[in-house]
Amino acid sequence: MSRKINRIHVSERIEFSAALPTGHSKSSAFSCAGAKASVPRASILRLAKQPLSTICYASQPMPFSSMRQPSFALGGASRTPILLRFAPAQLSTLPGLRNEIPKLQAREQSSRANWAQQSLFLQTGSLGRSRPCRSCDARSSIITTTTTATIITNMQSKLLFALSAAAVAPAAAEQVLGVYIFHRHGDRTSKSWSPVNLTPLGADQVKSSADFFRNRYIDDGASLQIANISVDKAVLSQLAITAPVDNVLQNSAGVFAQWLYPANKAAGSTKLANGTTVVAPLDGYQYIPVNTVVSASSSNSESSAWLQGSSGCSGAVVSSNNYFLSPEYQSTFSDTKDFYQGLLPVINTTFNSSTATFKNGYTIFDYINVATIHNSSIPSDNLLTKSTLSNLYDYASTHEWNLAYNSSDPVRAIAGSVLAGQIVTALQGIASGNAVPKFNIQFGAYGAFMSFFGLAQLPAANNDFYGICNYASAMVLELVAPSATQLSEDDLTVRFLWSNGTAAENGLKAYPLFGQSQTTISWNDFKTGINKFAVANTSDWCNTCGNTDGTCASSSTASASSAKSSDNSNITKPVAGVIGALVTLGVILGVEALIILLGGLRLVKKSTLANARSGAASPGADKA
């Protein structure tokens, strides 16, 4: 299948450096056609082993220190190359490429007439196959002579070169069947002032994220396109976009839906019986509902200063409160007293000496964090040094992690358990081949991320999972088949991917779940692991939380009865129920027989009893 190819223009020569890393390292900012994005750098020495895909227009110089992966590159975060340019003499020193130089030079000679400026066309392909370039001019084509793409040079014999970003590189033949995304809202106003609202910056962050996921899973030609997903028209049966009842989360989800399937005159129009074509408002706006959900993040969570403030789970509230009684909390409270009191000149319009403590560690961090983003002037901002801001974040993360998760008290992580239940339920429907949504996304609060991270043992893979995630962060679970024809559940695998902050800027990186070493886990092992802590229905939630009122009232009564009937027995609950009913019937019949025997009563026909009643109701009887 041909893929959409974009032309790349690079305006600065980039020399080979011996300092080029052999592994991955952090990348820095680079703006490509107005979209910021990033990806870990890949080693040049890995070039010959990596497949290539293409990238977007690059209209400015790209020194090596500032290379980033554009967010809308084909193939998404997993297959987009980083661009480098080398002189032929430098290229000849690279392992695995020495034999390619004569081919490149020959290609250059035959292509000079078509290359008026420095350009590069690349396309993933199999050995020796010539492929057309759909979005290039008709004279251009790609010839892949190795497992990497051939490099086509310009008329000055300067080579443009691309190497694949090694992060999350999928196998060439695999097929993504569906995804579940849990997404934090975009930038918002401070929780210290109600009502809390999504800001224009936050909306733009979510919009960029929607663009990223559309290009990764939906667009034509995407290497990770979900099987049979509609490309241009939103098919509601394929989508599940949800958020709890909360201004910030609902609005974030609405923005995401708007840009996942943007306005499209063809898709957003209809032809009437009289031949008139009507286009939906806003040039074919596609109306995708954001459904409310009994969520991993509780209702109005972004208006609550306390993590469990509106969770409704009694056990979780008690468990989180226990942290405030712990020696760890008391020690940190004491150690940070001077730190928070020292911030009063910055925060004294909202906090005073009694509230400027570690107990309000998250609220103070949130207040200052929002101010540093939106306020051009902050009182006593000289106190907000880099070290101070780092400590604010660390203390807030410690505070919130301990409210969201405790390894010895699982109920504290109820938000993560509910999320796990929603994930496995959604993916099971896809794995079973049912007519269920293929693209699932839920918007929620940072606390649910923390709870899930703890339950899934993700801090074992990276300590960053202990921290509060940035606005517009997203975790993704991809359900993958080895090919489009191998769809047995025994063949399916799951990948967990994470982006701290919008994926358009940071890309996605795979991490292992449940303390394993591999970033890909079989579907069956995934179900086993996640079902150890998943809460997938109301009855389980009520039992876990210990709630007995409201919706839990009938559930708790039924659960208690059935649990008691099956204690210390190998009899299943349904069988135990039948036996209980028969025993109850026998007791009732026995009591009736005893009453008849001792009371001198006798059984009579129903017709006899009816005749007696009719006689009692006659006029003569009234006179008696």
Image (cartoon, helix red, strand yellow):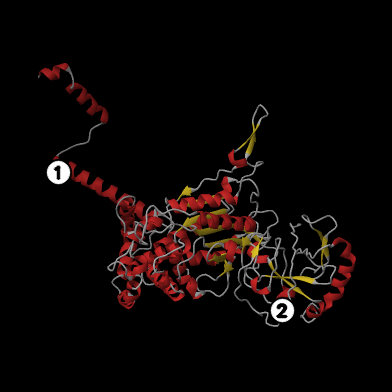
Mark 2 highlights which residue? 45
Task: Say which residue appears at 38% left-offset and 57% top-offset.
Answer: 541
Query: Picture quarter containing residue 92?
Result: bottom right
Task: Say which residue appears at 42% left-offset and 55% top-offset.
Answer: 537
CA distance separating discs 2 and 1: 98 Å
Mark 1 highlights which residue? 598
- Left or right of 413? Residue 35 is right
Question: 329 or 379, which lies in front?
Answer: 379
Question: 384 or 539, which lies in front?
Answer: 384
Q: Quadrant of the N terminus?
A: bottom right
| Disc 2 versus disc 1: nearer the observer | 2
- Measured as percent of width and height from the top left, residue 538 is found at 39, 54
**Amino acid found under the numbered disc labelled 1:** Leu
Dot 1 falls on a residue whose secondary structure is helix
Dot 2 falls on a residue whose secondary structure is helix
- Left or right of 567? Residue 190 is right
Compare marks 2 and 1 and give the one earlier in the sequence. Answer: 2
Question: 39 or 485, which lies in front?
Answer: 39
- Measured as percent of width and height from the top left, residue 507 is found at 60, 65
